[in-house]
Image (cartoon, grey):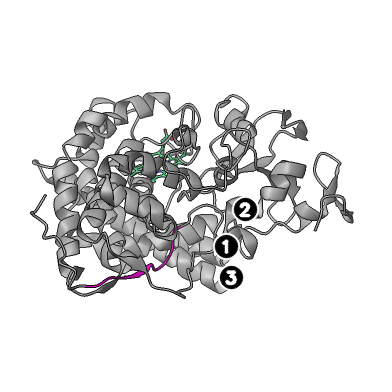
Amino acid sequence: MTVQQYSSKSLSPNGCPVSGLAAGFDPFRGPYQVDPSSSLREARAEEPVFYSPELDYWVVTRYEDVKRVFKNPDEFSATIALEPITPISDEAMEILGQYAYVPDNSLVNEDDQSVHRRLLAEPFGADSVATLEPRIRAVVNSYLDRVVRMGKADLVDDLLYEVPCIIALIFLGAPDEDIEKVRSLSVSQALFTWGRPDGEEQSRVADTFGRYWQFTGELLDKVKADPNATGWMAHIFDMQRQHPDLFSDNYVQNLVMGGIFAAHETTTNATGNAFRTLLENRVAWDEICANPDLIPKAVEECLRYSGSVVAWRRRAIVDTTVGGVKIPAGGKLLLVTSSANRDDDIFPDPDEFDIHRGNARRHLTFGIGVHTCLGATLARLEMKVILGEVARRLPHMRLVEGQEFRYLPNTSFRGPEHLLIEWDPTANPVPADRP
Ligand code: HEM
């Protein structure tokens, strides 16, 4: 469908007709689910900001426009970031009420969060995060030890499903007995907040979401009762003691529930995308196996080319324009960062995967501006260590041919549900302790 074809039926809220391209946009199925950045190639060229009646959102596809929105918190509010994109049914609301769930701010959906952010930031700093590297490496190798002699594995089930979760729990200071629970509950948060669950599914997901809320409360109780607790949750309680007016119990519970999700789901997906991309571009994979110093640059190119957060949201506070398009106050915006990351004004030959690209780090996968991802240093370190250890121990692995990659249908969180690999187990796999 081309942008010249206009639907006579609908007008966007600024009074302009809705084009065929805009009317056909559906982020929950079809081309966006296959590859969000490629699905918006035509939009980037012809209609870079458009109104989607299906979503009731303005979709922003070009780099400079996405960046401008992120960088202008006085014009664009972050309060919409965690709102369920599919309106919640009465039944689902009732279920959430039974769990006494009360939504609140939690940094990422908070305007003017700078005081909270400053008080909460210390454990995310480069020095604190660097102390986790040996533990990350040990966890990764303990998982690889289980599979290196098997000749085949599912990189998601056998490694990426749990490792970032364990690291997240270590970072948060939680006991790792709860991994399986955290993982299954997190998937429901992605569907609940960024997916299109139908009525029955929404009620089921609301129930899981409620249990996630309850679980977070119990986890916080455990940490609060432990005088030797360390990690981000212990730090939050320290801040709560020092600034009780700034940290209500409900705020803390919302913050930690969001934090658990933010800390691992994103990284599991990002690393899954990275392995898929590198193995589909064998020359790049062979290069990093031969020269692991290339891995940090490869990580940035993977985050640009196939990031795990593909779109983020803002709401216009005032009447404004984005890319020359009038957006009325209250207008909701879907900032498709994965599309911005393929903008040829910024990244020459954007559809080429090139681990030597000079400016890959300018990608917008972590956002930019006052809310830019606090966990980016940890995420980068995890990805570097996981890629490095797998490249060292299984350089000869390859993707199983003919497999179909599946993704959870939603606007924003993207990573393969499974990633099947195989290798020759007699080809002398490197043991964990050999450099
Ligand atoms: C590859 C992995 C990750 C990606 C792609 C990612 C992406 C993002 C994005 C897009 C935002 C919102 C930016 C904005 O609104 O401008 C964000 C915020 C945030 N992320 Fe991440 N994230 C990742 C890993 C992590 C990890 C590992 C943690 C925690 C350990 C974390 C904690 C946070 C927090 C606390 C915020 C809110 C910051 C604020 O609003 O001030 N993230 N992240």
Residue at 31 percent of width and 36 percent of height:
377
Q: Quadrant of the N terminus?
A: bottom right
Which of disc 1 and disc 3 is earlier in sequence? 1
The residue that mark 2 highlights is 38
Q: Quadrant of residue 9?
A: bottom right
422 part of magenta stretch: yes
Which of disc 2 and disc 3 is earlier in sequence? 2
The residue that mark 1 highlights is 34
280 part of magenta stretch: no
- Describe residue 165's horizontal placement relative to residue 27 as left or right: left
Q: Do the CB atoms of the residues marked 2 and 1 lie less than 8 Å apart?
A: yes
Q: Amino acid at mark 2?
A: Ser
Secondary structure under the numbered disc 1 in the rendered image = helix
Observer-nearest residue: 354 or 215? 354
Q: Amino acid at mark 1?
A: Val
Q: Which residues are magenta?
A: 415-424
- Describe residue 23's horizontal placement relative to residue 144 as left or right: right
Observer-nearest residue: 291 or 247? 291
**Crowd tier of the residue under label 1, counting other residues whose Cα lies within 10 Å: few below 14, some 14–19, many 20 or above:** some
Above or below: residue 93 compared with residue 133 = below
